[in-house]
Image (tube, rainbow, N blue to C red):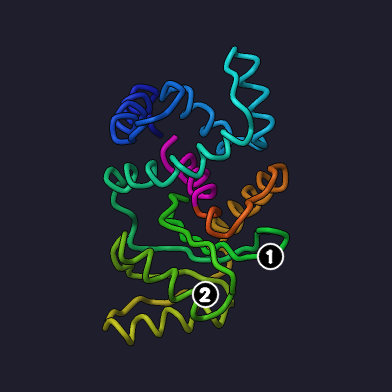
Amino acid sequence: MISLHDQRDNMRERDRAISFKGAHFPPEVILMGVRWYVAYPLSTRHVEELMEERGVEVDHATMNRWVIKYSPQLEEAFQRRKRPVWVSWRMDETYIKVTGQWSYLYRAVAKHGQTIDFLLTEHRDKEAALRFLKKAIRRNGVPETMTIDGSDANAAAIKSYNQEYGTAIAIRQVKYLHNIVEQDHRGGKRIKRLMTGIKTIAAGPDSLFGRELMLILL
């Protein structure tokens, strides 16, 4: 559990790592708005109203631009400070609606629920799973074991990665060990249903990363 003192230190260091050049609002106001949007089941219009109640005049369109602009910078700052992850991963995918079409969110979490990485894709197949694996391993190292459900595509992707890179990631298909990922997916879907929705699949990762960041660091 991160202490309140550590949380404040993390926020101050993230503020220094993010460029607010050209911003018309103080950094603490921008980050407060982004935090509300990604951490709670609020739309940008809800955040606009909350800001107005606190004497800050900012419209929902500006709020949306903040999320898209500053989430990648938050990600970069986070990656520099990210703690080492466990060598045992849980991997799964779930669906999420983007521009009226269902897309797929691949996620991996560590043994105790720590988010390792994620990827939003248009397809749910071996190629998408392999692309996610390469991204996650490139940024977090090679796990010793990967727990998945009965997905043939995910199993094939792991085997393909092992063959291509000479690794020996063990595949475990044990349902009860997989509950951590599935339960967190359900929480994510409840939040996204109450939000106005992701406008494009290109902007999706920025909005989604904000939520993942809140789960990891705060």
Measuring from the top left, give residue 61's x and y in whole percent: 61, 36
Residue 34 located within the stretch drawn in magenta = no
Q: Nearer the viewer, mark 1 or mark 2?
A: 1
Nearer the N terminus, badge 1 or badge 2? 1
- The residue shown at (50%, 44%) is 68
Q: Quadrant of residue 201?
A: bottom right
Judge the density around disc 1: few (<14), some (14-19), many (≥20) Cα neighbours within 10 Å.
Answer: some
Q: Is residue 70 positioned above or below 5 on the image?
A: below
Which residue type does callout 2 highlight? Gln
Judge the density around disc 2: few (<14), some (14-19), many (≥20) Cα neighbours within 10 Å.
Answer: some
The residue lying furthest to the bottom in this view is 163
Considering the image in quadrants, where does the C terminus appear?
A: top left
Measuring from the top left, give residue 47's x and y in whole percent: 63, 29
Q: Is residue 203 positioned above or below 10 on the image?
A: below
Residue 102 marker: 1
Considering the image in quadrants, where does the N terminus appear?
A: top left
Residue 210 located within the stretch drawn in magenta = yes
Question: Badge 2 is on which residue?
Answer: 173
Q: Is residue 106 positioned above or below 56 on the image?
A: below
Q: CA distance from mark 1 to mark 2?
A: 26 Å
Which residue type does callout 1 highlight? Trp
The residue lying furthest to the front in this view is 22
Q: What residue span does the magenta drawing correspond to?
A: 206-218
- The residue shown at (35%, 31%) is 21
Measuring from the top left, give residue 177's x and y in whole percent: 52, 63
